[in-house]
Structure formats: C-alpha cells, structure tokens
Image (cartoon, rainbow, N blue to C red):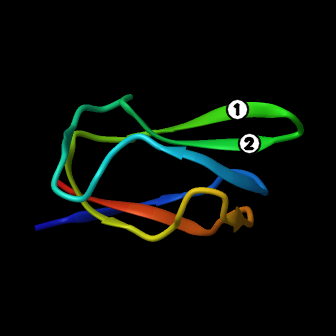
Amino acid sequence: MPETRIRSDLHGVIWKIEVAVGDRVAQGDTLILIESMKMEIPVSAPCAGVVSGIFVKEEQQVAEGEILAMITV
C-alpha cells in the first residue's frame, strides 16, 4: 500500500492534533494545527486514506520539512 508522508511547511509548535492513528481522512481534512508567528496554521491531508502514523506530540517544536504524520492510501 502506498504511503504519503505529511511534512511541516514551516517552523512552529504543534498546537493541536486533530486525528488519531487509524482514522480515515478525506483530501483536505485538517490533520494538525501548527502555531507559528502567533497564528494557527492547519496541516491538511493531501489525499484520502487512513492515518498510519503520527510522529509529533502537542506542544512539540517542529522544523520546516519535518515529518508530522503518514497516510496510507
């Protein structure tokens, strides 16, 4: 089964994780909210599938390009 890695587009702090491993998501669903520059930026699913991994925790600092989650198509 193909997997899609979800990466952070920016440096920030994980504010809220909206999904859990095993959740089915549709393209465009919000997976994670990142706080950066006092703004909440949603990280959306690029495709439909099942969340097969979450590699961050709330309040964790993340760098641009860091893998946040994985979706199995």
The mark found on residue 71 in the picture is none
Residue furthest to the right: 37
Q: How far across and how far down the image is residue 30, in percent? A: 43, 33
Q: Nearer the viewer, residue 16 or 66?
A: 16
Q: Is residue 2 left or right of residue 11?
A: left
Image position, residue 63 (x, y; %): 74, 66
Q: Name the element at disc 2.
A: strand
The reply to whether discs 1 and 2 touch (Cβ–Cβ < 8 Å) is: yes
Q: Does 59 sit left or right of 42 as displayed?
A: right
Quarter of the image for residue 46 reads: top left
**Front position in the image: 34 or 44:** 34
Residue at x-position 10% and y-position 67%? 1
- Residue 55 lies in what quarter of the image? bottom left
Residue pictured at 70% horizontal, 32% vertical: 40
Residue corresponding to mark 2: 35
Percent position (x, y) of residue 47? Answer: 30, 41
- Residue at 24 percent of width and 32 percent of height: 26
> Which residue corresponds to mark 1?
40
Kind of residue at badge 1: Glu
Q: Is residue 70 left or right of residue 23?
A: right
